[in-house]
């Protein structure tokens, strides 16, 4: 599989919410950087992170309209959409961009660029926010320590 094909399959697995499939495409030292600059380094942590994110946004999807490739690095432009807990009154769609690096057939970096104000506001309109903190804490690698 070419690097570009690897990225296209990674996108397909995001849209299918195929967490195990995403894990198969990540390097062991996979690095995820969210739109706020928070980093998660480690494939297993990121598998848990995707699982939690898909719990929050069960209809999350990305649409990539343009892909630019330079060596192992990709820049992608399009949109992301979803709704908090799948509730239609919390749905959103926004422009987004992603940077990815592929080496030896594995995605070693996935970075998101998007204005997260709309998704965060959709969560604040829901009564389920307090019950749903753990998945996102796992996604950004900030799980609370047991006391």
Image (cartoon, grey):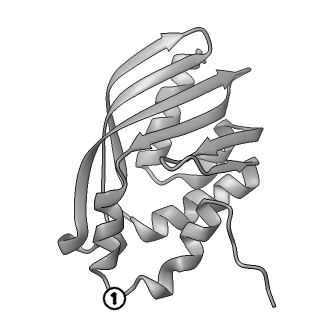
Please report the residue visible at 71 percent of the width from the left and 21 percent of the height from the top: 103
Quadrant in the picture for residue 134: bottom right
Vertical placement of 14 versus 56: above or below? above
Vertical placement of 87 versus 39: above or below? below
In the image, is 95 to the left or to the right of 98? left
Please report the residue visible at 65 percent of the width from the left and 48 percent of the height from the top: 39
In the image, is 126 to the left or to the right of 108? left
User: Is the C terminus in the top left, top right, bottom left or bottom right quadrant?
Assistant: bottom right
Residue pointed to by mark 1 = 127
Q: Return the residue found at the far top.
A: 71
- Residue sitting nearer the eye, 36 or 3: 36
- Crowding near pointer 1: few (<14 within 10 Å), some, many (20+)? few
Vertical placement of 143 versus 22: above or below? below
User: Is the N terminus in the top left, top right, bottom left or bottom right quadrant?
Assistant: top right
Q: Where is residue 53 in the image (x, y as percent from the top left)?
A: 50, 63
Q: Position of residue 10 (x, y in %)?
A: 52, 36
Please report the residue visible at 32 percent of the width from the left and 59 percent of the height from the top: 117
In this rendering, the count of numbered labels is 1
Q: Position of residue 126 (x, y in %)?
A: 30, 82
Q: Is mark 1 on a helix, strand or loop?
A: loop
Please report the residue visible at 56 percent of the width from the left and 57 percent of the height from the top: 50
In the image, is 34 to the left or to the right of 85? right
Vertical placement of 118 versus 143: above or below? above
In the image, is 28 to the left or to the right of 118? right
């Amino acid at each position: 599989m070419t690097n570009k094909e690897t990225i296209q399959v990674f996108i397909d697995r995001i849209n299918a919410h195929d967490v195990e499939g995403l894990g198969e495409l990540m390097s062991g030292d996979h690095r995820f950087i969210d739109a706020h600059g928070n980093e998660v380094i480690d494939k297993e942590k990121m598998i848990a992170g995707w699982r939690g994110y898909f719990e929050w946004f069960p209809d999350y999807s990305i649409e990539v309209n343009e892909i630019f490739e330079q060596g192992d690095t990709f820049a992608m432009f399009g949109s992301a959409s979803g709704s908090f807990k799948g509730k239609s009154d919390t749905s959103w769609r926004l422009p987004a961009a992603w940077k990815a690096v592929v080496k030896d057939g594995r995605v070693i970096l996935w970075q998101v660029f998007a204005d997260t104000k709309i998704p965060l506001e959709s969560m604040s309109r829901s009564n389920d926010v307090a019950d749903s903190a753990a998945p996102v804490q796992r996604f950004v690698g900030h799980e609370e320590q047991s006391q």
